[in-house]
Image (tube, rainbow, N blue to C red):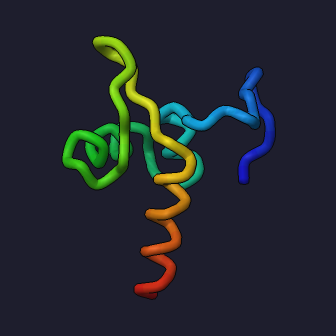
Amino acid sequence: MIGKEKGEDTHSLCISIPEAAKWLGISKNTAYLMARLGQLPAIRCGRRRLVVPKAALMKLLEEVKRTI
């Protein structure tokens, strides 16, 4: 996992789309596109902010890992 950066709360349940992009090794634009297409689990908070639940991201990575 990525360590504590820019005041990131390591105990939070969700991460930002840019942070999820870092975890996945993709650009933030690709991560936003994946979220819009439903390929990256994201929750809208308010009108503009999207967050990715850490548990859902870990589950997605485990599913991909099993197919490799």
Query: Seen in the image, is 2 located left or right of residue 52?
Result: right
Please state, as top left, top right, bottom left or bottom right, where the C terminus lies in the image: bottom left
Seen from this angle, which residue lies furthest top? 47
**On the image, which quarter does residue 63 sit in?**
bottom left
Residue drawn at (73%, 47%) of the image: 2
48 with respect to 54 (left or right) = left
Q: Is residue 24 above or below residue 16?
A: below
Number of numbered markers: 0
Q: Is residue 23 left or right of residue 32?
A: right
12 to the left or right of 58:
right
Q: Taking 22 as reference, is 45 above or below it?
A: above
Taking depth in this image into account, of 36 and 56 the one nearest to the observer is 56
| Residue 31, above or below 68 | above
The residue lying at 74 percent from left, 35 percent from top is 11
Q: Residue furthest left?
A: 37
Q: Residue at x 74, y 28 (%)?
A: 9
Please state, as top left, top right, bottom left or bottom right, where the N terminus lies in the image.
bottom right
| Viewer-side residue, 28 vs 9 | 9
Residue 52 position, x and y percent, is 46, 39
Q: Residue at x 29, y 12 (%)?
A: 47
Q: Position of residue 32 (x, y in %)?
A: 33, 38
The picture places residue 44, in percent across and down from the top left corner, at 33, 26
Q: Work out whether residue 47 or residue 26 is closer to the camera in this orientation and state it.
A: 47
Q: Position of residue 33 (x, y in %)?
A: 26, 42
